[in-house]
Image (spheres, grey):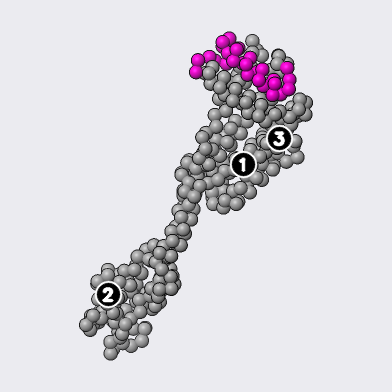
Amino acid sequence: MDDDTSYSSECSAGYSEGSLHSIGELARLTGLTVRTIRFWSDTGVVPPTDRTPAGYRLYGPDALARLGLVRTLRDLGVGLTVIRQVLEREITVAEVAAVHAEALDVQIRTLRLRQAVLRAVAGRGSTPEEMELMHKLATLSDQERRRLINEFIDSAFEGLDVDPGFLASMRNGMPELPEDPSQEQLDAWVELAELVQDEGFRAGIRRAAEDQTRAWQESGRPDGERTQRAARTIKERTAAAREAGIAPDDPAARPFLDEMAVVLAEVSRREDGPEFRAWLLERLEAGNDPRYGKYWRLVAVINGWALPDMDPATEWLKAALRAEAHG
């Protein structure tokens, strides 16, 4: 009988010669269907050992073990071609496991990215167009993600006399999703990718950079180390004021403001006084796009960094300058 013999006939044959089994017996012993066993037999991964005089397939004692291994590997997503190579000792199970573990890592990463997109869509009531965009953003490769951020930086600062150290910090602060990102990191990436493609955000960042460039042209480029020291002073003094319960418009805020104004005047190569403080408030207001702080908070979440906390200090300083100007 040829291979076109119905599998029901093979199942019902019930033939057993010593340790040989029919397809029907293998099905009862393994819990697999006759159709599955026959298909695997046809593909060569579980070949018959012999045939009955009537042409029915018979399988030797190793068939049970082979079927068990084939079922396990198939459950793990391994293809029949690779399974045949394993059974024929062309490759080892360990090698197959390593390759498929890596493939599963990629699949898991992709599924988690898709999950982040779906959660974002569900939470925002996104349109089909927005969902398509978010899906593209979530499934970008590492190289494509870096290209997207670099394109944003180029768009925002190209042609401006921006401090090279500032540009370097922007490019060095590249968001890098880890191999096993958390849901929070995935959500942050989707949000960041949307943010850097927002034309309003790009325009706001560029306006702030243009204002900063004009300020440098007037008073010279600030020293990087002095700028960092000034930032630390602002954070420390505003934190001390807040801990003491001193509001920016409280008269008790004046000594804190004076101390910070002196340091910032030195960095800006200007003399402290009402004119400088008005100029300083104007600069702070010009760069007051809260989404810039959001940008760095999202990068920090993606990269697993400590969250930046400069925004509260800057807001306190601006409020104190406004209160003084209107006092």
Judge whether 13 appears above or below 113 on screen. below
Residue displayed at 35% across by 79% down: 47
- State the residue position of label 2: 26
Task: Specify the amino acid type for callout 2.
Answer: Leu
Tell me whether the residue at label 1 lies in contact with that at label 2, contact meaning CB atoms closer than 8 angstroms. Answer: no
Mark toward the start of the polypeptide (2 vs 3): 2
Residue 95, quarter of picture:
bottom left
Q: Residue at x 58, y 13 (%)?
A: 253
The answer, for residue 102, to whether it is visible in the render is yes
Magenta stretch: dominant secondary structure: helix
Front position in the image: 135 or 264: 264
SS assignment at label 2: helix
Q: Residues within 10 Å of mark 3 (few under 14, many from 20)?
A: some
In the rendering, at what x and y percent does residue 57 appear? Answer: 31, 82
- Range shown magenta: 243-271
The span from disc 2 to disc 3 (Cα, nearest Å) is: 75 Å
Vertical placement of residue 172 versus 254, above or below: below
SS at mark 1 in the image = helix
Q: Earlier in the sequence, mark 1 or mark 3?
A: 3
What whole-number distance in Å separates the C-alpha atoms at marks 1 and 3? Answer: 14 Å
- The residue singled out by tag 3 in the image is 163
Please provide percent x and percent y for residue 83. Answer: 40, 70
152 with respect to 75 (left or right): right
- Which residue in the rendered view is the most extreme toward the bottom? 53
Q: Is residue 255 magenta?
A: yes
The Cα–Cα distance between marks 1 and 2, rounded to whole angstroms, is 61 Å
In which image quadrant can residue 55 be found? bottom left
